[in-house]
Image (cartoon, helix red, strand yellow):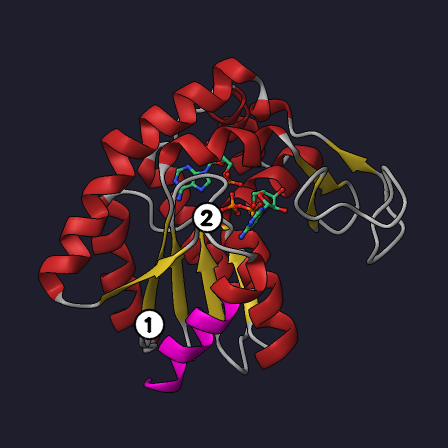
Amino acid sequence: MNIILMGPPGAGKGTQADRLVSQYGLTQISTGDLFRKALSEQTKYGVIAKYFIQFGHLVPDDYTIAMVRDHLKENTFDNGFILDGFPRTIIQARELESISREFKFKIDAIINLDIPLEKLVSRLSGRRTCQSCGATFHVEFNPPKVEGVCDKCGGELYQRPDESEEAVKVRLDTYNKQTRPLIDYYTMQGTIINVNGDQPMEDVFKDIEKCLEDK
Ligand code: ADP
Ligand code: AMP
């Protein structure tokens, strides 16, 4: 099963993707994680992405699409994948349709985590990410067992540099202008399923599982 997980920054895409990975053996493809890895390894995509990410802007479509295309081409996904953070623009969505025809896969579900934007600032400012494995925690809503240490791999937790107040404002504004129109695009196609992201993590997951049962 191949799934697109949509929602504004901080909606819980990564958190729910982690659970889908554990429960169903799917592979998470997070474009944010791919860019951060590219950045730390200073590959071509990392060098390009650096300034866009730092200031909360989207990386231009052509680079993002090329990176996703490379990733899909170079990897196998036996049990299927979860696209987390891609597509984020209508151009990316259209390109994904063409890539799926070319690589012969199907998107089985598009799930949108719905949450009021005013809830996102506290989610983002409290988020802590593992330096080594990318797992996410929250200082209040999902604290690690030992402060600053990843429960999963023992790696060091850090606060993402694009989580400064200024960058968060830009990211939410970018979401409204460039990504929200995608919801209408998929709604017109009749393919999107809205899930209430403003409830405890376990309940969000149960709702996602219910949607997937019908697929
Ligand atoms: P996204 O991948 O959509 O940007 P994350 O999954 O990283 O979002 O979640 C953002 C922050 O909010 C993290 O710190 C996470 O632990 C926390 N979080 C995720 N889902 C919930 C929830 N349902 N309730 C409270 N906090 C949540
Ligand atoms: P995320 O980890 O999903 O919050 O993404 C972090 C940053 O990576 C975003 O603010 C963008 O700068 C960049 N990014 C991630 N996914 C995309 C995408 N699909 N299109 C353009 N930029 C992206």
Q: Main secondary structure of the magenta part?
A: helix
Asked whether residue 73 appears in the rendered view, the answer is no
Identify which residue is drawn at 30% across, 63% down. Answer: 99
Q: CA distance from mark 2 to mark 1?
A: 22 Å
Q: Are marks 2 and 1 in contact (CB under 8 Å)?
A: no
In this rendering, position of residue 150 left or right of residue 36: right
3 left or right, relative to 162: left
The amino acid on which the numbered mark 1 sits, given as a three-letter code, is Ala
User: Magenta segment, which residues?
Assistant: 205-215
Q: Is residue 183 magenta?
A: no
Local packing at callout 2 (Cα closer than 10 Å; few below 14, some 14-19, many 20+) is some
- Determine crowd level at label 1: few under 14, some 14-19, many 20+ residues with C-alpha closer than 10 A: some
102 w.r.t. 135: above or below: below
- Marking on residue 109: 1
The earlier-in-sequence mark between 2 and 1 is: 2
Magenta residue check for 206: yes
- 74 is higher (above) or lower (below) than 180: below
Residue lying farthest to the left in this orientation: 188
Q: Position of residue 32 (x, y in %)?
A: 53, 42
**Residue pushed farthest top?**
166
| Badge 2 element | helix
Q: Which mark is residue 67?
A: 2
